[in-house]
Image (cartoon, grey):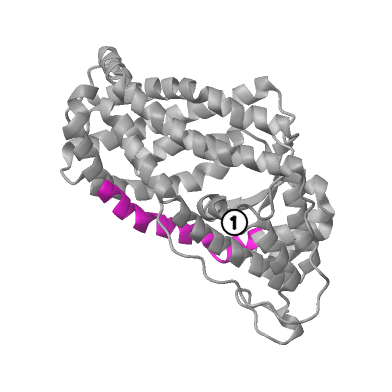
Amino acid sequence: MNQRAVAALVAVLAISAVAVLAGAAAPASPVPTAAAAAPPPTVTVTPEMRAHQRWVDTLYFAGTAYGFLVLLAVLGLGISRRLRDLAGRVTRRPFMAAMVFWALFTIVTTALSLPLDYVSGFLVPHRFGLSAQGLGGWLWDQAKATLLGIVIGAPLVAAALAGIRRVRRWWLALWLGAVPVMVFLILIAPVVLDPVFNTFKPLPDPELKAELLDLAARAGISGGRVVEVDKSKQTNQMNAYVNGLGPTKRIVLWDTIIAKMDRDELRFVMAHEMGHYVLHHIWKMLAFAVAALFVVLWLAQRAVEWATGRWGRGWGFEVAHDPAAVPLLLLVLGVLAFLGTPAVNAVSRHYEHEADVFAVELTHLNDAGARAFVKFAEDSKVLPEPPAFVRFWRYSHPTLAERIRFCASYRPWLTGAPNHVWHGPR
């Protein structure tokens, strides 16, 4: 999904209990063989790359803190109470009033967050040559994301508040309601949400398409769906991903990566994405989220009810199902999500490493894989060896230096050792 759309939906998913994961430690990488191999390629680290990394890391933590402050300001300054009262004047039906409140709340918080979003989403990428999108196009994407958050979020928020009002153990009701919401949003994202921001089409290069479909067949993917997306209108960076479930599952190549990588590098990247597909990582992460959310929402109800009893009257509400209490619930879930970030990323790094192992074992394109990761680092101006704390807290993938070293050294077929994750013919 478009990153801005994801950001806009975070609050939506939080209020409907689709927000927080908790984790486990990533297992050790398979032990590289001792077979001789060429030294791994190296990333040229520049002062510009270091400066970009500092900006990105600083804005991540500053943006998180600022988001929490916005929610506290909306509560403490009485903005949430006034929006609730305004929604009540529009309609006296509780469900509809909650929907109107969410629309107003989304507009206000989007406006309050816009300056920092502008710095992180527009100024910094342009300062470092990572985007050529005009300001008008960027603002239009933000507007679409805001509208999408309102359209999807309003009924979910209203349903969540109805559940809180009617069920004593509302954390359990939200958890049960979150599961189908999560599955549905993952299912529809490729065909309904993503096309709001970009155009998706079959690969125009018939030779590349044939090569990738042949690779998919070797990986055990029949009728694989590989599409290209026009991300160049928003960014100069490269990426590829797999999303969707069942009939909507597909592998997506950004047009930027097709333009910048050679055929072997593209085959390796696609093998990595096919690894996610074959190893069922989306389903595994979904199951993990459902289990973790059970605990998170249990904690959330206790925290929200305690804060409501202590400060709610001053904020303009006395019960958790009051629409004016929505920022409090979002704040609690946001803090829990932030605290759980290292654990979530540890699990993600495990699955990303598994996909790297799959790609090497399927293709034997060690050198191409290492070159691809060098290009990712240099093209996106990402440090191959970030500070340890940044890796621990922020990184959902192994560092690029780790991935380069792994690709250069992992060759079990040279010594007759078995594969670890892909067990097809070598």
Where does the magenta region start and end?
Answer: 273-299
Would you say 102 lies left or right of 412 here? left
Which residue is identified by label 1?
397
Quarter of the image where one finds residue 97? top left
**Quadrant of the rendering where the C terminus is positioned:** bottom right
Q: Does 30 sit above or below residue 24?
A: below
Q: Tell whether position 119 is magenta.
A: no
**Quadrant of the rendering where the N terminus is positioned:** top right
Question: Mark 1 Cα within 10 Å, few/some/many (few <14, many 20+)?
Answer: some
Q: Does 107 sit above or below residue 306?
A: above
Would you say the magenta stretch is mainly helix, strand or loop? Answer: helix
Camera-nearest residue between 327 and 307: 307
Q: Does 391 sit above or below residue 201?
A: below
Quarter of the image where one finds residue 360? bottom right
> Residue at 18% of width from left, 25% of height from top?
313
> Residue at 31% of width from left, 46% of height from top?
177
Secondary structure beneath label 1: loop
Residue 284 position in % (x across, y down): 47, 62
